[in-house]
Amino acid sequence: MRDGVDPSALYDRMYRRMHPDSARLLGEALAEPAAPAWPAGGRLPRQGADGRAARADFDTDLVLEPLRSLEGIEVVAVFKERFDGAVKLSCGPRRTFDVQRIAASFGGGGHKKAAGASMPLPMAESVKAVEALVQSALAAEGRG
């Protein structure tokens, strides 16, 4: 700051540069979060079917916390189709479920409470693959 750095301007340049479509995409993701439901109330919001999420570089992490706070939710997984055809997975649990195990299965990483992966599969296959792993893990923990 002594050298003339404006912290507010720097913060804005780093974190407040969302595409104008981001607010609409966030609203749509939160308005229709339940397809399909997992045991224990998991949700699979889907972004990107029409390419708007990829064009807007929509931050799927914006969807995780509001959905994770819903009663009955154990795990939230958000999928976004990217320009290169890969699918970005972002996931987070409500309580103690280790989502890093799921992301690691697809070469991703993170930690127990927030993880992600870039999946070189079409959207439908990505959703099915993650759904199967989460269902299996929840069942193994006696929650599914």
Image: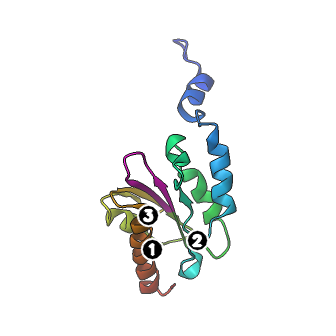
Picture residue at 45% right of the left edge, 74% below the top: 131
Comes first in the chain, label 1 or label 2: 2
Residue position for label 3: 112
Cα distance between the residues tagged 3 and 2 = 24 Å
Question: Residue 137: x, y in percent?
Answer: 41, 79
Residue position for label 2: 35
Cα distance between the residues tagged 1 and 2 = 11 Å
| Three-letter code for the amino acid on which mark 3 is drawn | Lys
Image vertical order of residue 136 relative to residue 13, above or below: below
Comes first in the chain, label 3 or label 2: 2
Q: Nearer the viewer, mark 3 or mark 2?
A: 2
| Three-letter code for the amino acid on which mark 1 is drawn | Glu
Picture residue at 41% right of the left edge, 59% below the top: 111
Q: Which residues are magenta?
A: 78-91
Circle 2 SS class: loop
Mark linked to residue 49: none
Cα distance between the residues tagged 3 and 1 = 17 Å
Circle 1 SS class: helix
- Classified by dominant secondary structure, the portion drawn in magenta counts as strand
Comes first in the chain, label 3 or label 1: 3
| Three-letter code for the amino acid on which mark 2 is drawn | Ala
Question: Residue 99: x, y in percent?
Answer: 43, 66
Question: Residue 103: x, y in percent?
Answer: 38, 63
Circle 3 SS class: loop
Q: Nearer the viewer, mark 3 or mark 1?
A: 1
Q: Nearer the viewer, mark 1 or mark 2?
A: 2
Residue position for label 1: 131
CB within 8 Å, label 1 to label 2: no
